[in-house]
C-alpha cells in the first residue's frame, strides 16, 4: 500500500468530502425506496438511475476511505526550502510569455489547476522539483517545450 503525501488542508478536504458522500448515501437510499414503489423494477427508469447513482457514490466513498487510510501529512519544516519540494509555493517566469505564475506543488490527489495547485507528476511539476531560485526548467507539455525560471520558493 503506497503512501499518498498530502497537506493538512488536503486531508481535511478529503475527510469533509467523505462525510458529505456518506450523508448523500442516505438520500440516495430513500430515492431507491421511493422508486421501488413505482412497480415493476425491470422497466423502472427511476429505480435504475438511483441504483447507478448509489453505485457511483459507494465507489467514491471507497476511494476516499482508501486515500485517507494511505495519506501521510507533509511536515515541511524539516525540508530544505532552498529547493523546490512537494508542498512548496513557487513563483516562476514563463520565459516565452514573459509572465509570472504562482504554483503550489502537491501530490496528484490534491492537484487543482484552477487554484494553482499542480501535481508533482505533471510535466511542469516534474521539471520544477529540486530546482533552486535562478534555475531554469524545461517542461515538455502537449503545446511544446515551456521554459520556466524559478523566481521564488516559499513554504
Image (cartoon, rainbow, N blue to C red):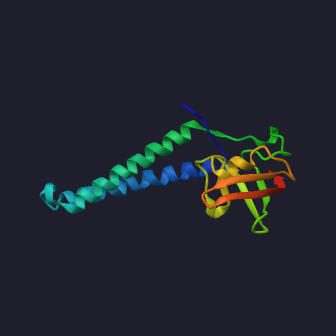
Residue 63 left/right relative to 136: left
**Residue 38: image x %, image y %?**
16, 62
Residue 136 left/right relative to 112: right
Q: Quadrant of the N terminus?
A: top right
Residue 140 left/right relative to 93: left
Q: Identify the residue at horizontal 78%, vertical 43% (top origin).
A: 130
Q: Residue furthest left?
A: 40
**Residue 61: image x %, image y %?**
44, 47
Q: Quadrant of residue 44?
A: bottom left
Q: Identify the residue at horizontal 55%, vertical 41% (top origin).
A: 68
**Residue 126: image x %, image y %?**
69, 47
Q: Eyeballing the image, is 29 above or below 99?
A: above
Q: Residue furthest top?
A: 1
Q: Eyeballing the image, is 79 above or below 1?
A: below
Residue 133 left/right relative to 75: right
Taking depth in this image into account, of 78 and 16 the one nearest to the observer is 78
**Residue 41: image x %, image y %?**
16, 55
Amino acid at each position: 500500500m503506497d503512501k499518498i503525501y498530502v497537506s493538512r488542508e488536503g486531508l481535511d478536504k478529503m475527510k469533509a468530502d467523505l462525510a458529505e458522500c456518506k450523508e448523500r448515501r442516505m438520500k440516495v437510499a430513500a430515492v431507491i425506496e421511493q422508486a421501488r414503489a413505482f412497480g415493476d423494477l425491470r422497466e423502472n427508469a427511476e429505480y435504475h438511475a438511483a441504483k447507478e447513482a448509489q453505485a457511483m457514490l459507494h465507489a467514491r466513498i471507497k476511494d476516499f476511505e482508501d486515500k485517507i487510510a494511505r495519506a501521510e501529512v507533509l511536515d515541511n519544516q524539516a525540508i530544505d526550502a532552498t529547493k523546490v519540494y512537494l508542498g512548496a509555493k513557487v513563483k516562476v517566469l514563463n520565459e516565452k510569455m514573459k509572465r509570472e505564475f504562482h504554483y503550489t506543488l502537491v501530490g496528484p490527489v490534491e492537484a487543482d489547476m484552477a487554484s494553482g495547485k499542480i501535481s508533482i507528476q505533471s510535466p511542469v511539476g516534474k521539471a520544477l522539483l529540486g530546482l533552486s531560485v535562478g534555475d531554469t526548467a524545461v517542461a515538455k507539455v502537449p503545446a511544446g517545450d515551456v521554459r520556466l525560471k524559478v523566481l521564488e520558493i516559499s513554504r
